Structure formats: C-alpha cells, structure tokens
Amino acid sequence: MEPLLDDDHFHDECGVFGVYNHSEAANLVYLGLYALQHRGQEAAGIVSVDDRIFHVSRGSGLVADIFKAREMERLKGRQSIGHVRYSTAGGSINVRNRQPLVVDSADGGLAFAHNGNLVNGVEMRRMLERRGSIFQSTMDTEVIVHLTALSRKQTFPERLVEALKQVRGAYALTAMDENLIIGVRDPSGFRPLCLGKIGDDCWILSSETCALDLIEAEFVRDVEPGEMVVIGPNGLESYFPFEKKARSLCVFEFIYFARPDSTIDGISVYEARKRIGAALARENPVEADVVVPVPDSGVAAAMGYAQESGIPFELGIIRNHYVGRTFIEPEQKIRHFGVKIKLNANPMALKGKRVILVDDSVVRGTTSRKIVKMVRAAGAKEVHMRISSPPTAYPCYYGIDTPTRAELLASSHSVEEMCQHITADSLQFITLPGLYQAVNGGPPESFCDACFSGDYPIPFSAHDEGGQLTLLQEA
Amino acid sequence: MEPLLDDDHFHDECGVFGVYNHSEAANLVYLGLYALQHRGQEAAGIVSVDDRIFHVSRGSGLVADIFKAREMERLKGRQSIGHVRYSTAGGSINVRNRQPLVVDSADGGLAFAHNGNLVNGVEMRRMLERRGSIFQSTMDTEVIVHLTALSRKQTFPERLVEALKQVRGAYALTAMDENLIIGVRDPSGFRPLCLGKIGDDCWILSSETCALDLIEAEFVRDVEPGEMVVIGPNGLESYFPFEKKARSLCVFEFIYFARPDSTIDGISVYEARKRIGAALARENPVEADVVVPVPDSGVAAAMGYAQESGIPFELGIIRNHYVGRTFIEPEQKIRHFGVKIKLNANPMALKGKRVILVDDSVVRGTTSRKIVKMVRAAGAKEVHMRISSPPTAYPCYYGIDTPTRAELLASSHSVEEMCQHITADSLQFITLPGLYQAVNGGPPESFCDACFSGDYPIPFSAHDEGGQLTLLQEA
Amino acid sequence: MEPLLDDDHFHDECGVFGVYNHSEAANLVYLGLYALQHRGQEAAGIVSVDDRIFHVSRGSGLVADIFKAREMERLKGRQSIGHVRYSTAGGSINVRNRQPLVVDSADGGLAFAHNGNLVNGVEMRRMLERRGSIFQSTMDTEVIVHLTALSRKQTFPERLVEALKQVRGAYALTAMDENLIIGVRDPSGFRPLCLGKIGDDCWILSSETCALDLIEAEFVRDVEPGEMVVIGPNGLESYFPFEKKARSLCVFEFIYFARPDSTIDGISVYEARKRIGAALARENPVEADVVVPVPDSGVAAAMGYAQESGIPFELGIIRNHYVGRTFIEPEQKIRHFGVKIKLNANPMALKGKRVILVDDSVVRGTTSRKIVKMVRAAGAKEVHMRISSPPTAYPCYYGIDTPTRAELLASSHSVEEMCQHITADSLQFITLPGLYQAVNGGPPESFCDACFSGDYPIPFSAHDEGGQLTLLQEA
Amino acid sequence: MEPLLDDDHFHDECGVFGVYNHSEAANLVYLGLYALQHRGQEAAGIVSVDDRIFHVSRGSGLVADIFKAREMERLKGRQSIGHVRYSTAGGSINVRNRQPLVVDSADGGLAFAHNGNLVNGVEMRRMLERRGSIFQSTMDTEVIVHLTALSRKQTFPERLVEALKQVRGAYALTAMDENLIIGVRDPSGFRPLCLGKIGDDCWILSSETCALDLIEAEFVRDVEPGEMVVIGPNGLESYFPFEKKARSLCVFEFIYFARPDSTIDGISVYEARKRIGAALARENPVEADVVVPVPDSGVAAAMGYAQESGIPFELGIIRNHYVGRTFIEPEQKIRHFGVKIKLNANPMALKGKRVILVDDSVVRGTTSRKIVKMVRAAGAKEVHMRISSPPTAYPCYYGIDTPTRAELLASSHSVEEMCQHITADSLQFITLPGLYQAVNGGPPESFCDACFSGDYPIPFSAHDEGGQLTLLQEA
C-alpha cells in the first residue's frame, strides 16, 4: 500500500479549535475539526474539562473515523479544545506526538493545541533536559508546556507569556486550564487564528473562519499577531505581551492551504485566488481554447484566469471523490496508473484543444508531469501550465511540511528546465509582486514568502534545522 | 450516528466490471471498481477464477477499505469480475445480498454481477421455490442463476440466454464460468455497459467508460441493448438472442448517475450536462448576479447555464472533501447544522447577490430547503433555484433506488408549492422536451423517463411492486 | 503467526443447540454455544425466527468475540438454533461454510445446524447439480437442504425425513422453520444429541448436557439414534422414521471430545474417563513416583490411574490459561519453544521423579515428543507415557477432523517404535476391550471405534473419501 | 457487557520482564510476558533499544492480541523490557497509564517497568509539581522517572538510586537506558523479581521463574530485597544501596498470585499450596465424601487437603476454558446464571455427596455464595468450605488491587456470619501461624500479611491512601 496523499503539495501541519462556555463544547470542537480537516488528516484530538477532570480522546486518521458517539459522550464539560494534524514524518506517524498535549501540573490540568513550529525548539529542549526535565514526545509543544510549568509567575496566562517569550518561531496556540481558554498568535502572525462567538458568552477560537460558519458562530475578528486572548469567567481579555514584530502571515494560506470559504486577516481566500488567477492571465497570456483547473486546488485561480482571458473554463480533469487514503499497489505491469486513481482526464473537454492547465504550485514536479501526460493522452493539442504561485525553491521552517531544498524542483531548475521536465508546451508562474498585488492589493510587507524568496523572517540555527528527535518511536 | 449519504438524490444501485485474459485481472477489476465507486458505495466484491477454483472477496464499504493487499493476492487468475452496490435497504445492508453471486453447479463455478432490477423477479422466485429451489439471498440475481442452472441447454451462454428469456426488467450483467466472460444488456438497454480492450486479447466490460480510462484500456464500443457478448478462447462473439425492443436508456444517467468523464451510447455525459444547463437558461431565464452550482452534481449544468446566460459562474458553495460516511449526531441544541457538514456557503461569493442555484433534482426537497436557507443566511438577496431535470414524480422499478411515490415532493406538489416548500424566490425545472433536445438533440424515443412521466416501458405486476423479500436478515 | 490449536488431537467438528418457545431464545442459544465452545472454536452462528423473519448472525472466532450486545438484540423471536464449528480446512476457514445454513424456500425460511459428515455427500451433490441445483457452500448440510426443498411431501418434518433417507453418514441435526424446531440423530447415533426443558413448554436441544446445566434447563433424555423429535405448538412428538441400525456412538466423545461434566447416552464422561484411567493402570502398571496428567484432557484419566495405582497424583505440567489463538513465530534461534507456550513443566513436582504421564491420545506424536522432552528437562528420572485410548491408526469419516492415514503415527509404527519416537521410557495404550469395559461395563457393540480398528460401520465410496470441494474460496 | 474478571479475588497489578544482550530481545520479552500474563491482563507493553532509538509498543488487552508480527519487527535491538498490567481503575483503563514508561532525558532515552505501589507517591508528585514538573500519567512510576532525571549524580544507576531513596513503598522495577538494564527490588522485598541467564552473556530479569522456563533460560537466583542489579557491557554488578529493612514478601503470592510452577525466594509455589491445603485439613477436619477444588486457584490446596485427609479428590466443578473477557448480559429472566458461565458443577461427582470445597480466599463473598448454591443444586448433601488463606479484612497499599475495607466481607463479619452469608454448612480458614508453617516451615517474620492482620510494614499517610489522581482521563 502507498499513501495517496503524496500529491506533491506543501502540507499544512495543523488546525486548532477551542470552545469556551457551551453545554456541548466537545461536540462543537468535533464539528470545528471537521471543517478544519483540510489542515491535517493524519491525527486528531479533543480534550474537554469538567469539574477539574480533563477528558481526552486522540487518535490517528480522519475526524469522522476517530471520534465515535460513545467516545464523545465521555468528553463532558463546557470548555474544550481540539487539534488536527498533518504528520511531518512522511507516511507513518509517531503516536507519542498526539495533540492536544495534556498534562497535570502544580495548578491542575493543562491542555495545549499548537499549529506552527519553533526555530529554537531543539535548543530549548536540550536546555530543559539538562535542568532535569523529561520529554515524552518530540513535539515543540512539550517545550512550551515545560517552560510554562517552570515559570514562577502567579497565573496560567502570565506563565504562558513567560514561556513564549523564551521561544522563537511560528505558533497559533490554543491552551486551556480548568477555568480559562487562551488563544495566542506569535508576534509575526505566521499562522492564522480567529475569534468567534455564539450568543453572548460562548467564545470560539479557530484556525479558519470556515469552521465558525459550520457551527453558526458569529465571526468576531482575527486574533492579532502577538496578541494573547484570555477567555474566562470575566469574559475576553486581550494582551500584547510580546515585542512587536513585522507581520509575516504565510502567503501560501491564500494560494493553497486555507479553505476558499475562509477569510484570513480580512482577505477572502476565494476572492484572492480568483484575483491571482486573473493576474496570472495578465502576466502570462497564451492563445488557447480552454482553461482547465487541476482539481480542486486550482479551480478558483482557473476561474479567475478564464474570466480575465475570456477563454472558456472547462472541467477537463475529473476528480474521483472516493479516493481513500491507501491504495493497493498493483504489480509492475499496471502500476504506472499513478495519479489517474485520483484524477481522470475528461476527453470530451480536451480532445483537439489547446489547453491552459492551472495549478497552485510545482513542488517536486512529479504530479505535474503525470497530469500533463494524461491531458495530452486525452487528445489535447497543446498544454500550457500556469501556476498561481512563484517557484517554490526554499523549505519552510515555520510549520509547513516541505521537501528538503534538494527535492524542490525550482531550487535547481530554471523555469525553462521545469517546463521540459513536466513536458508542457509552456510553463509560467505568477511573479511575487503580481502575487502580492492580487492578494492584498499592495506591497508584500505583511507576508512571509520565504519558500519563494529564501528571505526567512526569523533566523534559525543549523542545530534546529537538522535536529532530528527520533529517540522514542511508537506506532 | 446517521448516514450522510442521504443527500436526497436518487441512487444508482450498481456498477459492474469484468476482465478477460490479463495476468493481473483482479487488480484491474479493483481499479475499475474504484472508478465506478460513484455507482455504489455500500458494498463491493471481486471474484477471480484460476484453474477452475473461484476466489471470492466481498465486503461492506468502499472499495479501498474492503480489499487489502493480502486479500488481493488470493484473487489469482486471468479472469475476474466485480461489483459495487448501493443498498436499497436504507441505511443498513443485508450481507446475504453480496455480489458477485458465486455458485457451484453441474458445470463448475459460475459468477454473476448484476446492475438492474427484474420486474418479474418475485414471481419467478415463487415459481422456482415451488419447483424446490432454495434461495440464500433476496437478490433478483439469484433468480437468474437458478434459471441458468436449470436450463437443459448445452453451453453456459445458451443456458444464460434461456434464463434471461424468462425474466423481464433491467439488467447490465457480467457473468463468468471457468472459461468465459459474458456481458449482456437487457433488450431495452436501461443500464449502460461498454466494451474495452487492452492490447490484442485482453477484453474489458464496464458500466462506464471512465473506468476504461483509468486502466488505460481502449474503448471499443457500447454493448448494444439486447446484445450478449461472449468472450473466451475464441475471442469475442456477439449475439442478439432476445426479441427486439425499443431502446429505453435511463436518462438520469446523464442528469446525475454517471461520471461526467464517461460517454454512454455515444453521448458525453459532461457535454450533455452543460447542454442541459444551457437549455435550462433558455427555458427559464432570470435576472441575477451569479450562477452557483450545488456541488458536485450541479457543476456542469451550472457552467452551461452561466455560459448561455452570460451571468458569472461562482463557487458560492464549498464542499468539504473529508466528509465521511457517518457523523456523530450532536444533541438537540446544535443538531440543526445538517447539510452544513458537507456543504458550506462561501459568503464572499453570495453576499448581496441575486443567486441562481443550479442543482440536478429535487427529490424529497429536504436538502434543497436547507441549501436555500444557508445561501440566504450567507447574505444572498435573492435565491432562484434551477433544476436540470423535470420534476421526479414517479418511482423507478428498473434498478434505481427511489423513495416511494408519497415521499416524492413532485408527486403531490405543484412547482409553485415546491418553490414555497424550499423557500426559494423562484424554482424552475427543465422540460422533458428541452431535456431530450439537450441530451441527444432530438426526440425522446430512446430513453426511459418513467420517473418524470410515469410512462413505464416495461409493465410490472402489483406483486412485484410490493413484494418485500425480507425473510432472511443478516448484518 | 501460526495457530496454537494444532495440539495434535482429533478435533470435533461441531456443536448444535436449539431453543423452542422462550422469550430470550437467542440469548439462551448464546449461552448454550458458550458451553459447547470446546466442540468448535473457529466459527459460530445463531439464527432466530420472529414473525416469519429469520434473523441470522454468523462469524469467525469464539462465541464471546462474535456476538456483541447490539448483534444479539437483532435476534428476536421465541425460536432459535445455533452452531459452533471446527474447520476442517486447517488453519484458514472458508466463510462460505458458515452455519446455521439459512435459506428461503417455497414454505418460507428454513435453518439447519449440523454436526456430522455424510459419506455420500459428494455423490448426492453431483446428482443434485445435474438436476439443476446450485451450491453456495461445500457443506454436506446444503445437500440435506436441497433434498428437503425438493421433496414433494406435505410438511417440513416429512420432507426432512425424505431427505435424510437419501443420505448416509453421521448427523446430529437441529433444524427450524417458522413454527417448529426439529432434532434428529442419524440411525447409528454417531454424534450425541440430548433434550432438555425449562418450565412446562420451553424445549432445548443440545449436543451435550453441560449446556443444559449452564442455562439451568432440566435434562429430559437423550435423543435416540434414528429418532426425530418435532417440537411445535403441539409440544414434542417423537418419530423413528429410519431403518433401524446398530448403535455406533463415537467412543472418542468419552476419551476426549465431550466436556467431563456432560453425560452422554446415560454415561458420565467424567466417570468414564476416571474408569479408563483405572483400567489403564491395571493393564499397564509401572513402578513410579508420580502420576502427572497432560492438562487438561488427561486430568480425569490420570486421577483414575493414580487412585487405582496408589501412586500420588501431581500437577507436573501447568497450562497457561491465557494462550490465545495466534502466536507470533519468533526467529530461528528461539522458535523451538513450541509447546511450552501452552504447557510448562513444574520442576518441583518432577525433579528426580519417575513420572507416569497420562494423555488421551497420540495422533502424529509431535506434541507427545515435545512434552516428554520438557518433562525430562525439568528433572524427571523416568518418563512413562500412558494413553487412555488405543492407538489411532485410521481416519474418521463421520464428522471428526483427523489427519490422513499416512500422518497418523500409529498407522505405520508399532507401539515400540512410537515409544522410541516420543523418546519415552515406556509407552502403553489401553486395549479396546479394556476401553469398552471401562466406558460402559460391557461389550463394544454400541460404539464406533473405526479410528482404532479400521472397522467402519457405514461404508463410503472412494469418491467421497477424496472428494475435495474447493471450487469456491472466500476468506 | 460486563467483565468476567470480577471473580472476587485480589488482583496482582503487574509483571515485569527484561532481556539484556540477545539478538531477539523483544521476542524473548514477548514470550516472557506471555508466561506472566496471569499477573495482569488489561494492558501490556514492550520497549526495545537499538542504536539509541527506543522502539515502543503498548496496548490494551492480552499479550497475544496486542503484539502482532509487524509490530514485533519494529522492536529491534539487543535490549528490551516489558510489562503486563492489571488496571486498578475497575473495568475501564486509562490509556495514559501504559507501561513501560519511556521518556527522553538529558542522557537519552529511559524506560521503566514497575510492579508495586509507592505509599508516598502522591506526596512526592505534589512536591515535584511545585518544582515545575509536569505529569502525563497518574502512575507512581512517573514520580520515579522525574526524580531520576532531576538527580545530579553522574550515572543512570546512581541517579536511580538517589530517586528510589526518596520514595517509600513496594517496587520490583526493571529499567533501561541505551546501554544498561537495571533490576531493583524495594528493601522490604514486597514483590518478587528473579534473575536468569541464556548462555554466557544474555541476562534475564523476570517477576517469576515460570517465564524463565518458557524461554529456556537458566534460573540464576532471586534479586534480593534492597538489591539493585546493573547489567551492562561489564556484565552484572550487584549493589545494596538502601538502608536494610525486614523482609516483607507478599504472602499472597503463594496463596493465589504466582503461577504454581514458579519458585519465589526459594519456595515452590506449588509445594507451598499443597502444604497449605494439608495444614488446612489438619486444622479444620470434617467428615466428608469428596474434596473438590474451585478451579483453578484452589486445585493445589485441594490436592493437599485430600492427601492429608484421605478423602478422595474429585473435579466436582469444571471450568470453561473459552470464557472471554466480556459477556453479553442477558435480560432479567436469565441473568442470574452468573458464575456458571465460567464454572459448571459436575453432577456425577457431587450428587448425594458430602463435599469439601477448597478455595483460596473469600473477598466480597459474592462468588463463594454462587458456587455453594451451584454445588448444592447439583445434588451435594453437605457443602463445607475450606479457605487456604486467613480472612482478608484489610486492603493492600503495596501494589495489589483490593476492594475498600468496607467491601471486604471479613472486615465486618465473623467467620460464623460469613458462613451463613455464603450458605455453606461450614466455613473454615487456615490460621496465620498455620499458613506460615506451611509456606516456609517457620515464623512469619519474612512476609507481609497486612491484608489479614492489618499490620502494615510501611506506614502510609492519609493523603496517599485517599489520593485519587484522576485529572487526566483518556480511553
């Protein structure tokens, strides 16, 4: 068997969700995670607190497969947080790294759900171990928990602030003790986090707004970069305890990660994608008969491209909605079907046509090559690939799962060479200025574009880059 | 838990697939069933034959979940047939009714995979029981098998012909003994069946062409209504052993059942859907700002509508791709989220807009009502529903799972009343002539439209209509 | 993994149980099968009938693992029969052969649970297939069902009689239509079947009396060889419709198969085993320090041996009660531990002792050899093996799973050679006259001892002996 | 469903096993845990270390169900420790409390498998939490791990010594870093631990000797109370780092917990049980016809009783070997069958007899009452219960799962009243002096008998007695 998820994309590592003060807190978290499933499909967890007891349920797989009715009934209480995770470890997952991380401390239970990655995580871990701390996972989150527990400050929010002041990197964090739920976004604001409300006194924290829609919560506002919101019996309190930094929201959220029906920091993901598609059409026009999206990530950009160019939009590739997570690898003779399990060319829309294929990115190039071949086999006369991101030439250290630099096609190939590699008639990427113009109408100041530019907003040590923590393996 | 599949559609009951003379016959059937999964998600089975031994694997659920690597290794041999099934029994499934049906007879093993429904099935069953036959399932297919075994003819094809001459109804059948694979389509041609080829001497039978594409088989031609193809050591032989009847291909295959990248009896499903959408726009124009499909079944028709009307096409509803088959029903307070688990309004594409919603059918009206409400809650100023089929007022007896007449909204409500029921600003259905014009450019002679017109091409006895065979229940 | 059940014994193939007229019929059958689990651990099934609907539940494994609470709730009705099965197919099981066999016929549902084996099963099957019957399993039981359905007689009992008159072999059968439960034992009475009662009008059929004890049913009497009891609204009616034959109860039931707390045809299994042990002591005395049973099957005979000989009884071998059905085979170096997983020598009871080991049989000799070696390694000075059955030199054709003749150690080795093979200091078997004297105090007229004597009470054709029906394989 | 394990016994909480320097270390641990399964059936875990990586596998249920072949292949390396556990939390189990506990620390991975209970565990935990430690389980073991990690000593053994000097209570501990395996037994020696060897340089640690037998390891000696053995590249080194205390081996190991084929601190469990039975016969003679054990725990004592009294030993109660861990509770009418699922009276051995029933203990009295009733219903004329332990009137705080004082029948009932409660004709317990005389031939100085006498060798604070740590619940 081999995973079908290896679809040659960058992968988001997590989504977080929290509910304060609802009689069905854990059920709402369940629904929220359902809506955030695209941010992580390998594991999920929910923890609720009821009368000081923390009830935990965590497992591998999709939300709908992990949490069964009987399990949900255990998760009592009016406070709950949850987490979905994409594993960085490739196919297999280390069960020790399940989130939320829940521990017992001097002040009772604490639970943490973390989206992001620390650049000084390994360094801090080594320091803590030398102090006598023991680690039961390889997650950065456990570093934050230890630092919180070791703080001499009075309250949980104060201790968490002291802990976070010692770490550097990306985090959108939801944490909970028996009385409070805290949401906090790192000073650069790499990963999104927003705030919602049901009625007067039930508060919601979510990685994306689409999850608020599902549970019919009112969108209140985004949590700001560097902001900590503390939600408890006194309502919501907002703090900005960290040194101010330039905003560095991950621009890839708009290109691929976020769901199109979400709005992040005031920008509609769907509208942004359509604008990117339109900009792509303006920057890289080509004479053609049809604009065909690579489903589903390329659809909005392809619509924008088609609208701008006036070339008809066609569903030239059909996605099989029943593709599971594993697939039996057939023997040699028929194993080359590869990508066709998931995507099938629609010959009627392609035969004899000059086709503009719109996709969101080219990572290793393996999938693009197969798609071009498939489209051509279905009768396309020309295949012009248009990509709604600049070439991805650098790995991410802020919480996104990317191949190593060497594996990134753009790190060692010119656009020309990439075009030859994927056997397209032409290949064009949107420019970085064009991208920013399309996303927020202006200059790139507020985004992280390290994966395109190699310009990393937060430096990282060589130690952290290569620091593999694989001492404890549990399947 | 409740099934999420109850999405208020008619449901196809089956898909069949067969491979003759390939070293990886069962693996190809596995891939074929993968591509036909949309025709039935409740159960699947594969049988192969190797040196007279019939190896069988059948189970409940999706193809990817049922057949594991170890299981597939058992399915040796160069001949194999398979089946995917939608259960007619509502949520639960009677495991006795698994297909392919495989039996031992005087001439060795026989396997049958059947898409369709006999209108004299119960009658024939009672006759056979009176003769002393015993039944281990409630499937019509078992009737065909008994009749085949009882025939005094010399060869398996001859015996199968004699059996089929005694039954009336819809069938696209794939059958196999230890030497031959047979494909046969009933004289009316209700259900599709096509023929493909890999290389010179490997033949494929499939419900739809999209499955041929996946395995890179060459499409040869459709099996004709009333045709039996016998594939064996002598290659393919074609017979027309039945009395000729008017063609009655199920028109709903073009509206909803078939995958858009399939071509049935010469007509591209995708193109037909776009033409239906365009016809719908011509028949029922309305001033509006956006055309929004109900994903995924309404997408092609909405594209046709948008193109014809010049009104922009927008993804105003986003489908969650990670929806599983079951879902934990939350308590009273939050249970009304219903359809939102699967579909989420994209507020940016809807707010303040006059929206034309395009869907393929209104069956009970429950889902339509929820979608209209959701779209309006997302800020739509007007909601105009346009349906790419005529009102479905009559149940199907030819192999499609439909509600009873009483449950069909159109059987007791005028279009006006239906519009009120689903709370839309307007509701319009394509006309039957408009539908046929769009599908095949001409008169309706060659299709079955009983579900719209009540005009049943093959009469059925009251006995069969109500004949519930629920004597043997096994979960 | 390898099965641990291969403990070098003959294996019973089935147990049957039936309940007529109890509000918890299926629950009682569940309990009954629990008590009969020793007769078959590979598969089990229960069927109940409620208002003409037959509810079926069947699965692989142990009773407690197959039937879960939710499943049992489905099994409504006041009539129920059940079956436990030992697979003849070695490790793996063909799921097509699940019992009870439940079919739909001209007169409604019929269910059959069968313990035994027909000697003309293959022959009858071929005849039926030539008539046009189809088979969905390889079980003899399906032959009986076809013959019953084909009978022109008026009532179910009459039809079943007509069917059974056409077959030869061993059967203790429990069958059920929607009104009646029938128990029938073949004219030779190979396999046991008894009758119990709860209150005035609830009747029980069971392979052994120990299952009556569990459900606190009163033991009424054994069903006689050749007797058919029909239990229905008119109470119990008894018939002797078959030609009378000499009684041939399987004597191995007393040696090994039956549970010691059962009584069969008036003889307590426990008492019989003790008497056999005593007779063994008289026939084959030896000077020794301790009598040690091979647990658990040798315990009662060892007690009888110890009591008769005056040599102390000691638990020199301890059985691990947590042995599961599968076991991970370690690598070469440590794989020879074999039997020790299940049995461990108790060194304190063996060291320096002259040991008499009492076991019930030597089949292939593999396990005996390992046990002798283990006992010696624990310090035993001498090891004298005493077996409570005569040498088993012939396979069984009446429903017991035995190795082929060639695999039976006694078929090709003298007792002397067998002793050398298992490396014991001496080896003795009880004589056939001694066995009968011990079991029923008299001559062997009423038992089948074919496995010792090769004297088969019912002849079988070569065709049946070798007739492998493996056309349909389903895992 | 309800657990069948509630058989009204005290329950051992754990078994530990370790292997140093074997190419199949984890496979040997698997076999060792198999042999120790009687010490804990609710969960098990194995950890191996290979080139600094700790490979962990832990799960709920029986050893044979948890560790599958594929899982075992992951557990590479020449060092491995394992653990079986009986949950104290009643039926359900908190998955957070899985053992071995494996953590990452300043000096790499550490693994701990612990049998026992600390009396100052909660106190130490609170102290550690105040220092900033976080806890992920409710196990005492985690306290030991934190103390070890916080130690400033140089080596792992030194740090572990410093940690253990701070705790009080019962422990037989197996611990491992990447180079060493350590076995240590608390200064009182409450729980057993022994040392074995395979060849010249492979060392084994095991809770009981029966596990050495299974893997054909040579028994070297018991680990002494207060001894720490450190096994590494330099071979085995022995230390006695703790203040010397009086030996307090749990006497219940001889009565019930240990397997009869084990030898603990020089005493054969089997021989001890037989001697206890004989002493019981001398102390409490009664005229009777048969001595019947309650299987399996009463068998050896009953043999001793029978031998001493000259009254015949009979298997008057038969145990069903296929009893699983859960059982479907039938409805009201038939639910009183209770204990009969597991034990069945053998009427032939009881009818008309005066019966001496020998069991190991009476805890709540519920099972004893059912057994007496069952034996009487099978026809016994008199039932005299003889118990091979003194009345258990006090709970255990050293690692055995006992009911609260109030639930212990003996805490509030005289022997006379207990006899009435269980409806026996007479009831007698062995005396404490008689017990010690039988076990080690002398005075009770070297055993813990707190559960009989209330004389606790190590004092405990009220805090620890009641200290429930249930903050983190995970199923």
Image (cartoon, coloured by chain):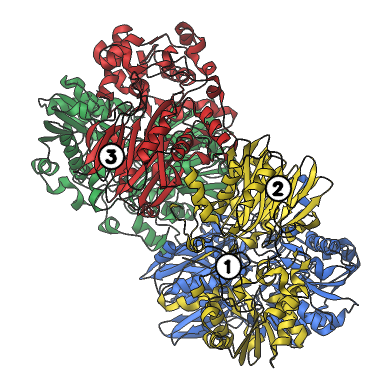
Chain colours: A green, B red, C yellow, D blue
Residue located beneath label 2 in the image? C182
Residue located beneath label 3 in the image? B204
| SS for dot 3 | strand
Q: Nearer the viewer, residue B330 or D331?
A: D331
Q: Is residue D229 visible?
A: yes
Kind of residue at disc 2: Ile
Q: Is residue A297 visible?
A: no
Kind of residue at disc 3: Ile
- Quarter holding residue C255: bottom right
Disc 1 crowd, CA 10 A, few/some/many (<14, 14-19, 20+) = many
| SS for dot 2 | strand
Residue D5 image label: none
Callout 2: residue from which chain?
A: C
Name which of mark 1 and mark 2 comes first in the sequence: 2
**The C terminus of chain B - image quarter:** top right
Callout 3: residue from which chain?
A: B
Residue C396 image label: 1
Using residue A320 as the reference point, say whether residue D194 is left or right of it.
right
Distance from label 3 to label 1 (Cα)?
47 Å
Using residue A182 as the reference point, say whether residue A271 is left or right of it.
left
Distance from label 3 to label 2 (Cα)?
49 Å
Distance from label 1 to label 2 (Cα)?
26 Å
| Figure check: B115 above or below D115 | above
Callout 1: residue from which chain?
A: C
Q: Nearer the viewer, residue B410 or A389?
A: B410
